[in-house]
């Protein structure tokens, strides 16, 4: 291969370092995104407590263990009453995602499209039966092994393999396959949204439970009616802390956490919709490149790889093979 001319060598080096800079920036943004929930919690606490301290409030007044026990103990009890064992397991399993999950990136979508393109190309060149071994044992598949990110995501991996098994073993027309995929996605999405729905209902109950704690505090205060004003004022303040904790927990913490769980579930649905769109197009006799382009169009604009990015990834793979 002839050496690069000085101009092209300089451009090649510039592109190389630009690519490194972009990838480094994306990793940094991904790490920050994982901390968004924790950052949000800190911001809420700083804003509320900071405002209270600015007005020379006494933080010790806000420390009311009995109020905390009444509100959050009742909230936990109501969650247990309204849920079955599977629901509680789903909620516990999804709580960790609040602080670790991040939106599906452009690189992940590009990896997914390239995997589908390689599978589609193999089917077109060697026939449907050629991918039977790939979808039955994806961990040992030469195609899937090129995409460790997809292999690590068991839900996406199973969705791809299960539906390729259907394509291989049946002669299902495109409209019937689309209906089948819609049923599958709807069932998965229903289960994925259960935790966020349950947590949102707990959030809705917290202001009411805060009022319960406040009423109980007032009842205790009435028993001290003969005490000096300083004692009564402290007791009434402690009772009002119940309302404060209930409202703050609902709108500052638990409600937003439920919304975050919902966003995580909907982000996963988009990934499945991309796969569905590409599969239906391919079964409808579209060329592999057109099928993955159909899938690309199902990706939201913010994370959608460009046409040229996908084209470049496909060309690089072809050059390697």
Image (cartoon, rainbow, N blue to C red):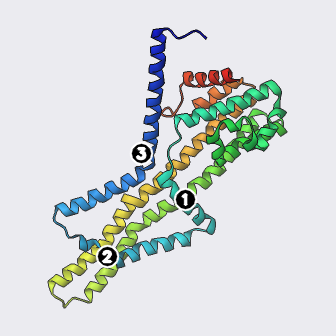
The kind of secondary structure element at disc 1 is helix
Query: For the point 24% across and 75% down, which residue is it?
Result: 237
Residue on which the image places disc 1: 195
User: Of 196 and 119, which appears nearest the observer?
Assistant: 119
Note whether 3 is above or below 170 in the view shown.
above
Residue on which the image places disc 2: 64
Image coordinates for residue 296, horizontal then vertical, percent: 59, 30
Earlier along the polypeptide chain: callout 3 or callout 2? 3
Q: Badge 1: how crowded within 10 Å, few (<14), some, or many (20+)?
A: many
Q: CA distance from mark 1 to mark 2?
A: 29 Å
Q: Quadrant of residue 229?
A: bottom left
Q: Is residue 256 visible?
A: yes
The mark closer to the camera, 1 or 2, is 2
Note whether 3 is above or below 215 in the view shown.
above
Image-based side of 250 in relation to 180, left or right: left
The mark closer to the camera, 1 or 3, is 3
Q: CA distance from mark 3 to mark 2?
A: 34 Å
The kind of secondary structure element at disc 2 is loop
Earlier along the polypeptide chain: callout 1 or callout 2? 2
Query: For the point 79% across and 33% down, which residue is it?
Result: 173
**Numbered badge on residue 32:** 3
Image coordinates for residue 191, horizontal then vertical, percent: 62, 55
Q: Quadrant of residue 60?
A: bottom left
**Numbered badge on residue 84:** none
User: Of 73 and 284, which appears nearest the observer?
Assistant: 73
Note whether 30 is above or below 52 in the view shown.
above
Q: Badge 3: how crowded within 10 Å, few (<14), some, or many (20+)?
A: few
Q: Are marks 1 and 3 in contact (CB under 8 Å)?
A: no
């Amino acid at each position: 291969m002839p050496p690069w001319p000085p101009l092209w060598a300089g451009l090649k080096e510039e592109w190389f370092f630009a690519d490194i800079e972009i990838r480094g920036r994306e990793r940094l943004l991904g790490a920050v995104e994982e901390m968004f929930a924790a950052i949000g919690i800190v911001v809420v606490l700083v804003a509320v407590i900071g405002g209270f301290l600015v007005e020379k409030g006494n933080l010790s007044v806000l420390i009311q263990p009995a109020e905390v026990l009444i509100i959050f103990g009742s909230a936990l009890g109501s969650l247990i009453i309204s849920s079955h064992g599977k629901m509680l397991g789903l909620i516990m399993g999804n709580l960790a995602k609040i602080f670790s999950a991040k939106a599906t990136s452009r690189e992940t979508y590009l990896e997914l499209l390239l995997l589908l393109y390689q599978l589609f190309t193999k089917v077109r060149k060697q026939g449907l039966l050629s991918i039977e071994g790939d979808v039955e044992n994806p961990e040992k598949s030469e195609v899937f092994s090129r995409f460790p990110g997809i292999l690590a995501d068991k839900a996406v991996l199973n969705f791809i393999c299960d539906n390729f098994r259907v394509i291989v073993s049946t002669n299902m027309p495109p409209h019937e396959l689309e209906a089948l995929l819609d049923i599958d996605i709807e069932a998965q999405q229903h289960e994925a949204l259960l935790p966020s729905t349950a947590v949102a209902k707990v959030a809705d109950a917290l202001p009411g439970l805060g009022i319960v704690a406040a009423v109980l505090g007032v009842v205790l205060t009435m028993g001290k009616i003969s005490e000096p004003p300083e004692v009564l004022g402290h007791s009434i303040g402690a009772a009002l802390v119940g309302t404060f904790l209930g409202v703050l927990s609902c709108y500052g913490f638990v409600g937003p956490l439920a919304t975050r769980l919902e966003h995580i579930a909907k982000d996963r649905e988009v990934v499945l919709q991309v796969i569905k769109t590409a599969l239906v197009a391919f079964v409808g006799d579209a060329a592999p490149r057109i099928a993955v382009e159909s899938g690309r169009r199902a990706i939201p604009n913010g994370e959608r790889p460009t046409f040229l990015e996908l084209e470049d990834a496909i060309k690089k793979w072809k050059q390697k093979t």
